[in-house]
Image (cartoon, helix red, strand yellow):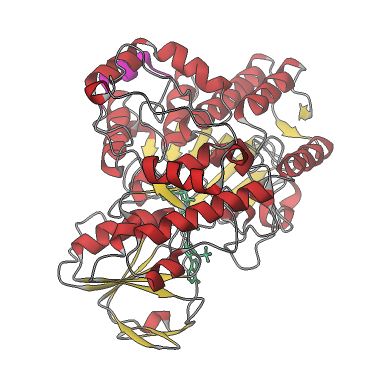
Amino acid sequence: MLDVVVVGGGFAGMYALYRLRRDGWKVRVLEAGTDVGGTWYWNRYPGARCDVPSLEYSFGFSPELEQEWDWPEVFSAQTDILEYANHVADRFDLRRDMQFNCRVRSVEYNEPEGHWQLTSEDGDTFVARYVIMATGCLSVPNKPDLPGADTFSGRVLHTGLWPKEHVDLEGLRVGIIGTGSSGVQAIPELARQSGHLTVFQRTPVYTVPANRNRMRPAVQDEFRENYRKIREMQQQNRGGVSGFSPVRSRRAPANGAPKPARLPENIGELTPEETLEVVRERGLGVLLGFGDVYTDLDMNERANEVYRAAVREMVSDPEVAEKLLPKTYGLGCKRQVLDRDYYATYNRDDVHLVDLQAEALETIEPGGVRTVKGLYELDVLIYATGFDAMTGALLRAGIVGRGGRTLNDKWSYGPVAYLGLQMHGFPNLFTVTGPGSPSVLCNMLVAIEQHVNWIADCIGHLRDNAMQTIEPTPEAEDTWVRHVNEVAQGTMFTAPTCNSWYLGANIEGKPRIFMPYVGGFPRYRERCEAVVAAGYEGFTVA
Ligand code: N01
C-alpha cells in the first residue's frame, strides 16, 4: 500500500512528488501521457507559449534550480517550458516514482479500511491513504459535437491534444475553429505554415500584443540575485507575479530619448481621442492598465470602443475588420489573450475569416466545412475549442466518496469545495488548484506550490498527531462557496454579458458558476494559513 497517490504528472504532480518524497512518504504519480509536463506536454500546437514571464512562471522551491536554468525568452514557448519540466524531472529523479500511460478511471473510497483505491484504464490498481488530484484546470479538451464531424475525410487535430510528431501543413488547406487564446496563438503560425488558412470565428476576441523579447542575460542575472525577495513579492501579489523590476540591468532609453510619459490610472482621465493616440504609440496593451476599465461599465465600454477603433486601423479590409471587432462583451470578462501578429495575419491573401454569427455552420462534410453560404474545402481541420475547465478532469476521474456518493452527484449544481482543496464526503482526497481557489487567476506555479505545501503540511500534521482522516464540514464548505461567489459579483468576470470558461459557459449544460477565487492570492493564502493556525478550522480531523 502507498501513502499517497498523485494523479497527474504536470507541474503540480511533479512538485507534489518532490515535496512528499522529501517528507518521507511513499508516493506514486499516475500520468496519462508518456512523460511529464501536463499542459505543456499536451498543448504542442504551433505558436503555443506562456502568458506569464518565465522568470516568474518557474518553481521557487529550489534555489539551485533557479540559478542553473536559462530561459531564452521573456515569455517562453511551449518547447522551452517542456524542456524545463524535463530538466526538473531529471534533476530530482522524479520519474522513478511516476507511472506514465496510466489514465485513472476510478478513485474509490474504501470506508471501512479508510483508504482509497484507484484503477487505471488498463486495470492496474493502486491503494493509498491519501489522494492528490493534480489533474490541472485546463486538461480536458472540449470538442464540440458539430453535425457531420465524423465524416470529414482529412486530418483532424485539437490544439489541446497536438501530436508529438511534426505536423507538415505545407501547401495544405487548413481550417481552424475557435479564436480563444489557443486559436489566436496558432492562427499566425498556421498561416505561415499552410497553403491556405480558413478561420471559423464564433466570437471575436480582445487580444493584445505579447512581449516578444529575447532574455537578456543581465536581466536574468539580476532576477537570480534577487530570487528570494521575488518569491516573497509573488506571495503578496494578487496574481502571484512579483512585478520585480530590474534596476541595474534596466535598458537606457535609445539615443537618450525621453522616457514615455506616465499614463493616468484611469481611462476616464483621458478623452477617447487621447486614448486612441496612446494606443497607436504604445499598442493595445495600454488599455489593460487602466483601473476603471475593470470596475466601471461605462469606462469599460470606452476602452472597448478605443480597442475597436484601433483594430479598424490595423486590418486593411474594412469588412474583415468589422467581423473581428468584439461587441457583445467587454475587456476583462475573459482571460486576457496575448498574440503575435494576430490582426496582421488577416491582411494576408491566403487567410480567410468566416464569421459564424453571420453565416452559420451547417455541417461538416468529407471535403470540408459547410456554412449557409457554401462549402469551405479543407485538407486539415483544427479544433481550438478550449477545455472543460476546472471541473472537467475531476468529474471524469470516477471519484466515489463516503457512502458511495459520487463527486458528479455532489457537483451536479456546480463545484462545492472548501478552499478549493477538499470536499466534504471525500476524506483524505485533495485537489491542487481546485475550484474555489485562485488557480487560473494566479501564476500557476505559485498557486501550485502553495497548495502542495498546504497539503503536505496537513498530512504531516495528521501523521505527527496519529490522526487518520481530514475532510471539511459541510458548513465550512457552503460558507466558502458563498464567499467565492460574493467576491466575484460586480466584477467584469461575472457581468451579464460575459460568457467564459471561468463560468462554465463554454460547455453545454454546465452550471453557470464562477469557479476561481477572485479575491486575490494573498487574501486566499492568508485564509489558508489562518485555518491551520486555528487548528484546521472548518475541517473534521479524526
Ligand atoms: O479556449 P477558449 P482556448 N463552434 O475556450 C470557440 C489557457 N491558454 O483553448 O467564444 C464554434 O478560450 C469559442 O467560441 P465562443 C488560457 O487560460 C493559455 O483558446 O465560445 N466555435 C472560442 O473562440 C485560456 O483562456 C495560453 O463563441 C466554438 C474558442 O473556441 C484557456 O487556456 C494559450 C465552438 C475556445 O476558446 C482556454 O483557451 C492557450 C463551436 N461549437 C490557452 N465551441 C497562454 O498561456 C467553442 N468555440 C497564452
Q: Quadrant of the C terminus?
A: top right
Q: Observer-nearest residue: 171 or 401?
A: 171
Q: Quadrant of residue 476?
A: top right
Q: Position of residue 274 (x, y in %)?
A: 50, 43
520 up-or-down from 32: above or below: above
Q: Where residue 377 appears, x then y in whole percent?
A: 29, 83
Q: Position of residue 94 (x, y in %)?
A: 35, 30
Decide whether the magenta segment is chiefly helix, strand or loop: helix
Q: Is residue 417 left or right of residue 277?
A: right
Say if 184 sits above or below 487 in the image.
below
Q: Quadrant of residue 524?
A: top right
Q: 71 or 329, which lies in front? A: 329
What span is in magenta? 61-70
Which residue extends farthest left? 171
Does the magenta portion include 346?
no
In magenta segment, residue 65: yes
Q: Residue at x 31, y 11 (%)?
A: 248
Residue at the image point whose x is 66% and y is 60% from the top: 497
Q: Return the residue nearer the eye: 274 or 244.
A: 274
Residue 196 lies, with reference to residue 388, above or below; the image says: below
Depth check, front residue: 146 or 8: 146
- Left or right of 304 on screen, residue 199: left
